[in-house]
Image (spheres, rainbow, N blue to C red):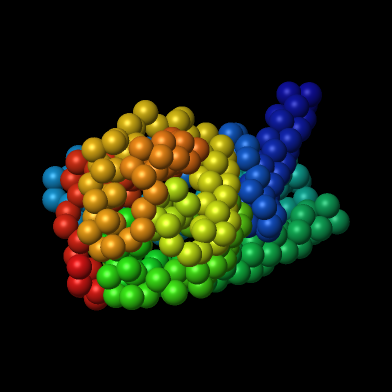
Amino acid sequence: MGSVLFLDLLAGFAGLAILGSSLVDLFKAVIMPRSVGGRFRASVQISRRGWRLWRTAAMRIGDAERREDTLAVFAPLFIVTLGAYWVASEIVGLGLVFWSLRWGINPTPGLGASIYFSGTSLLTIGYGDFSPVVPATRALSLFAGGIGLGTFAVVTTFLFQIFGAFQRREAFIVTMSERTGAPPSGLEFILRHVKHDMVADVGPLLREAQSWIAETMETHLAYPVLTYFRSSHDDESWVGTLGAILDAATLLITTAELDHRGEAEITARLGTHLVRDFAAYFRLPPSDAGGVDFDEFVLAYQSLGSLGVPLVPLENAWEAFSARRAVYTASLDAMAQWWRIPPARWIGDRSRIRQHVNAGLPR
């Protein structure tokens, strides 16, 4: 008798622990409006370990389009997996608690039947083949139904929030791609605006970029799954667009003597804030990528000069540019490597950069 009571207590506490961990994870992942760490949370473990495995397998694919399509599957699959985990863990946890109280259910269920009864209660199916007959199991059955309805309501809202934030992010990226090229480039951003006599547009665009950076920082830290969603268009990514904006702002501050230096300063500070916060939240080790070397900078300097852009003297510009860029290079490249973005100029893996494919504004 004592061993049976001990087993019932053990099952009950184990069920409560499983249920509690699932509900806490659901609350922190979906309801809390800020990023919450926790290396032992299931959603964190599934996302980070799952991404490592998925990314490793995808990077073995030789064809670039198939590789990118494979990487793009991860985020939607992760959402489905996470939803299934929350529901399954709630069913199993409640099932163990029901089994520990099986004397209050008619007919008396075994462990498997208790989990089945938990599922029908949580999903509010209620076939009637098992019935709670004492106040404790009746209350627990009602509690299970409430948890089920609440979970599905919260997850549905979560999906709307995720896809709304994704669409807003992508709308800005597509708009900017006409100005930064694809893959995005901060140098290309300046060259196109100078060549097409649109320098006056740079200030308003940087203000728009500031709003986009702020929204991306808030939404993607509150809902980290957004970071794994790939852009809908070839050679584009949210990390690449962010890097292009940062590089354009840095060139405007240090090298090109054009207007809008104040907007560039604010944009650079906001972008640096974002890359540092993301690198810290995802525990990304600093990248050992070399950044922009002097020869690359000289080519950019000459490209700007060829269009008549007034420039700071080369040595002064290089010293200021390299110092400014060093503030965010390691974190930005670490993000590019973690999410395996399409190669972009001065950002991440540049060994496989394709030519600019965006023909909206010809060079």
Question: Going by the picture, which residue comes out furthest to the right?
Answer: 135
> Residue 128 in the image: x percent, y percent?
65, 67
Residue 59 in view: no
Q: Position of residue 303 (x, y in %)?
A: 24, 55
Q: In the picture provided, is 35 more to the left or to the right than 53?
A: right
In the rendering, at what x and y percent does residue 64 appear? 17, 52
Q: Is residue 121 above or below residue 345?
A: below
Does residue 39 appear in this view?
yes
Tell me the residue at 69%/38% (across/down).
17
How many badges with numbers are in the image?
0
Toward the viewer: 177 or 100? 177
The picture quadrant where one finds residue 309 is bottom left
Residue 344, horizontal then vertical, whole percent: 28, 51
| Rendered residue at 68%/57% (across/down) | 33
Q: Residue furthest left?
A: 63
Along the line of sight, the residue nearer the viewer: 199 or 30:
199
User: Quarter-wise, where is residue 116 in the image?
Assistant: bottom right
The residue shown at (29%, 75%) is 196
Q: Quadrant of the N terminus?
A: top right
Residue depicted at 44% across the width and 69% down the height: 202
As drawn, is 227 to the left or to the right of 3? left
Viewer-closest of 228 and 107: 228
Q: Residue pushed farthest top? A: 3
Looking at the image, residue 124 lies above or below residue 68: below
Q: Quadrant of the C terminus?
A: bottom left
169 versus 137 height, above or below: below
The answer to which image quadrant residue 58 occupies is top left
